[in-house]
Amino acid sequence: MPFIRVDTLAGRYSGKQRAAMSDVLYEAVRRIGAPEGDRFQIFTEHPAGHLVCDPSYLGIPHTDGFVTVQITLNMGRSLEQKKGLFSEIAEGFETRAGARRGDVFINLVEVPRENWSFGNGEAQYAPPG
C-alpha cells in the first residue's frame, strides 16, 4: 500500500546510498502497518535547476543534498505514527545514506483503500460488490 517517490539532484547520491534509502523507507512504512513485501518505490534524479527548494524555509538550511520523499498510503495513521515515520526516515537517511536530516523533505498523501490496483485491472483492496 505505500507507493514512494524519491527525488534528488542527479549524481548527488550513489547507488549504494539510494539502496540504503530504499531500505530505510521500507522498514519505516512496515512499522506503521505496511504489509511484508509491499515495496513500491521510484527514485528519480534531476539535473541542476530541475529540483527547486528554498535554501532556508522555516529556518531549516537546505543544500544540494535535498531529498524529497512523497509517500502515498492508505488513510488511518495517527499523528504520532506520522511524526514517528518522519523522524525515522530523516534519522535513517542521515545515519545510513549520508543525507543531512535537514535536507529530507517528506510529504504524505493519504488515499482511500479502494484507490489501488496492484495488477490485472483489479481494485484488490476495494470492498466486494
Image (cartoon, helix red, strand yellow):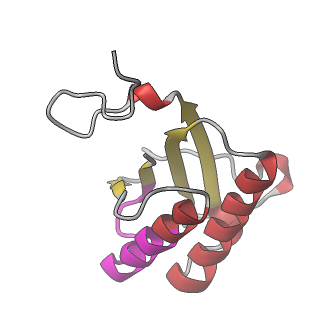
Q: Residue at x 49, y 56 (%)?
A: 34
The quarter of the picture where residue 89 lies is: bottom right
How many numbered circles does the render carry?
Answer: 0
Foreground: 73 or 68? 73
- Residue 85 as seen in the image, left or right of residue 109: right
The residue stretch that appears in magenta: 7-24
Position of 81 with respect to 118 (left or right) is: right
117 to 37, vertically: above or below: above
Q: Residue furthest front?
A: 129
Where's residue 75, x and y in %? 60, 35
Q: Judge whether residue 13 can be spotted in this image.
A: no
Above/below status of 101 relative to 51: below
Quarter assignment of residue 31: bottom right
Give the left or right position of residue 85, taking residue 18 as reference.
Answer: right
Name the residue at the left extreme: 120
| Vertical placement of residue 109 versus 34, above or below | above
Please provide percent x and percent y for residue 3: 41, 46
At a point 35% along the width and 69% down the height, the residue shown is 11
Q: Residue at x 39, y 72 (%)?
A: 18
User: In the image shown, does 30 or 42 lie closer to the viewer?
Assistant: 30
Q: Residue at x 61, y 44 (%)?
A: 107
Judged from this view, the residue extending furthest toward the right is 59
- Give the position of the C terminus as an image quadrant: top left
